[in-house]
Amino acid sequence: MSPERIEPLQNLAQVKAVALALFREKLVAQAERDKAQAALTEAQAALKLAQAEKASLEQETQVLLRRISELTLKLAKAESRDQQLALELELQTVQQRLAALNQDTYGSRSERRPVEKKEKKKKKAQRGHGPTPQLKLPVEQLHHNPSEVTCSLCGEQMTDWEGHAQVSQEITVVRRSFKIIEHHAHTFRCTCTNLKTAKTPDRLIPGGRYSVDFAVEVAIEKYADHQPLERQVNRMKREGLQVTSTTLWDQLHALYLLALPTYLALHDQILESELVHADETTWRLMNKGGSKKWWVWGVCTPLAICYLLLPSRSAEAARRVFKDYAGTVMADGYAAYAKLAGERDRNGGVQMLISPEGELSTQLSPNFKLALCWMHARRPFFKAEKAGSKQVGEGLDIIGQLYKVEQETKEAARGDPERLLELRKRDRAAKSKALIDQLYTWAAEQTRVLPKTHFGRGLAFLEKHRTELTRFLEDPKIPLDNGEAERGMRGPVLGRKNHYGSRSERGTQVAAVFYSLIETCKRMQLDPRSYLAALAAKAMTEKGAVLLPSEFAEVTKD
């Protein structure tokens, strides 16, 4: 081909390359605008929700204030004692409601009573707190020699005095960086025309550019450190990497597919325990034009937790959480737990389910014992005291004594699990049972309490759930409250505050898997980054492979 024809072809290729680059930049810019608009829509929806809640609270406050004014006037004009008493009781109820509303809106969230504050021993004044031990940080030694080694007294050359050096430590930071690794897979050939090409590392997404470690880093930042993808994109841009949130999501989803079998196995592993804790909290599913309230269900043991993100808080949703579990569930007083407890005994072990298409299917029912949480039993009495009720003090004191018995027992066991169960059985029979009898005797004496007040609700809860609240007296493995599960919900709640929820149902599934595995690692004091990398490596070489955090702990404990 002549030189005159080659040059136009080269120019045409350059024009095509430039046009393609501009087109790609336009697509990226459009994607960024779409993401920004979606984030703005989410923020506006959250703002509208907050404004609506504020307006509702203000409206209810005004209604209560007007009612207090009306009742006060009626009380002043009342002539009969019965009428005065009825008005006083209603006025007390409305005043307590107003005080509770103000407490919920502006007050402290702490449930500690002033009388429960422990007296702190006076400590001697101390300057500073000393250096914090950093056992997990690598140590790099830098040796410094004097700039002048000629003796200033005699002029002789000075030598190193071995073993004598002033050692000080300085903690610094090594910035995260990204780099491109070019894999050159060389091909070898034989004189017989046979060829052999080197194998390159497997990619999380076949043909993709990002490593497994990159995907793990994105998962840790989002589900352990609660950094939304858009925030990660901006941070990576400052560190030299140009990437979109869509790309980060693709990496997360690919890693999720590898982790899914392990997540399902983790759920089953937890349900093999004799005792599990359960709790639930809200989650937002963002859709175009609005959002839906979903629920995070958590079921856990001290060393593992599994989350399910489901569209409802119904008994059917709870059945998906517990499957055919047959141990003991520690929970709050939510009705779905009570409905499922002992269901197999009542219904023969099988539930008949009808699909939207009218097809029948069967599902095993759970058959667990239900133990209820004393934190939830205590809470209405605490709110009543905050609202000004003086009658609840004795009941709160008795519940405080129950917790004191548990704390003293725990201290006496000195970290020995077997000893703890032994002492619990002894101390609960000797001390806690008498306190329970005292509490219920006190509750029975409270006859002048309106049912719709916090005090009234607390008394009703005690009476209705006496069997479940006192089950801890029968089994030393049952703790006094459900703090284990409530603490376990902190991770998803922090994530919810930072990125509002999920943008799709698939997003809820991905969140459930990573929260479960990462929060379980935290409970076992494992490094979630190392664990997810090991899980991905195993699942990429063996399809459907499972690597539970407990198995990873066994492998790495040495």
Image (spheres, helix red, strand yellow):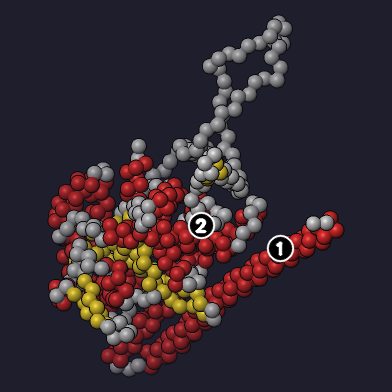
Please, what secondary structure does the residue beneath circle 1 have?
helix
Tell me where residue 355 appears, x and y as whole percent: 30, 82
Residue 451 against residue 414 in the figure, above or below:
below
User: Could you tell me which residue is drawn at 46 percent across and 58 percent down?
Assistant: 255
Residue 526 against residue 450 in the figure, above or below:
above
The residue under label 2 is: 206
User: Could you tell me which residue is drawn at 40 percent across and 89 percent down?
Assistant: 71
Is residue 5 among the parts visible in the rendering? yes
Q: CA distance from mark 1 to mark 2?
A: 23 Å
Amino acid type at image mark 1: Ala
Is residue 222 among the parts visible in the rendering? no
Q: Quadrant of residue 353?
A: bottom left
Q: Quick check: marks 1 and 2 in contact, CB under 8 Å?
A: no
Q: Nearer the viewer, residue 301 or 6?
A: 6
- Left or right of 155 on screen, residue 390: left
Tell me where residue 34 appears, x and y as whole percent: 62, 72
Amino acid type at image mark 2: Pro
Q: Which quarter of the image is occupied by the C terminus?
A: top left
Tell me where residue 290 appears, x and y as whole percent: 52, 80
User: Could you tell me which residue is drawn at 49 percent across and 85 percent down?
Assistant: 59
